[in-house]
Amino acid sequence: MAKQQTEVRELQEGSYVIIDDAACKINAYSTAKPGKHGSAKARVEAKGVFDGKKRSFSQPVDAKIWVPIIERKNGQVVSVDGDDMQVMDLETYETITMRIPEDADVSPDENIEYLEMEDQRKIV
């Protein structure tokens, strides 16, 4: 998995983080000020990018955490067959088979935007 390490204090809403070995997008980020016996803590609530599950964690703000490297790419729908579609990447001209999301209505020759992390892809 393509990832880099950063401190919890550098996270913000809308960015990505790895929780339980899954790439997640941060929905809520809050901090509690330092107390008598410890450092400041951050609470992060996120939703899985590819699986949609809600996850959260609480750690000191100076702790290190992994952040996934997710690429945003453009593609063109080549063909639609049942629940699958063939998408051609507009930069590399590589053809990829992707599952059509339930809420999406796609047709051939339509340009789409999708997220890619290793072998996982999702239409935006």
Image (tube, helix red, strand yellow):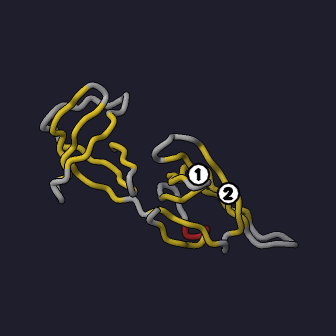
Query: Which residue is disc 2 drawn over?
Result: 43
Compared across the picture, whether 113 is left or right of 2 comes to: left
In the image, residue 44 lies at what x, y percent? 63, 55
Front residue of 33/5: it is 5
Rendered position, 25 above or below 3: above
Q: Amino acid at mark 1?
A: Ala
Q: Residues within 10 Å of mark 1 (few under 14, many from 20)?
A: some
Rendered position, 23 above or below 63: above
Q: Earlier in the sequence, mark 1 or mark 2?
A: 1
Q: Amino acid at mark 2?
A: Arg
Tell me the tag on residue 28. Answer: 1
Quarter of the rendering containing residue 58: bottom right
| Residue at image coords 25%, 46% | 96
| Residue at image coords 58%, 51% | 28
In the image, residue 103 lies at what x, y percent? 36, 29
> Is label 2 in a helix, a strand or a loop?
strand
Dots 1 and 2: beta carbons under 8 Å? yes
> Is label 1 in a helix, a strand or a loop?
strand
In the image, residue 36 lies at what x, y percent? 87, 72
In the image, residue 56 lies at what x, y percent? 65, 51
Q: Residues within 10 Å of mark 2 (few under 14, many from 20)?
A: some
Tell me the tag on residue 3. Answer: none
Q: CA distance from mark 1 to mark 2?
A: 8 Å
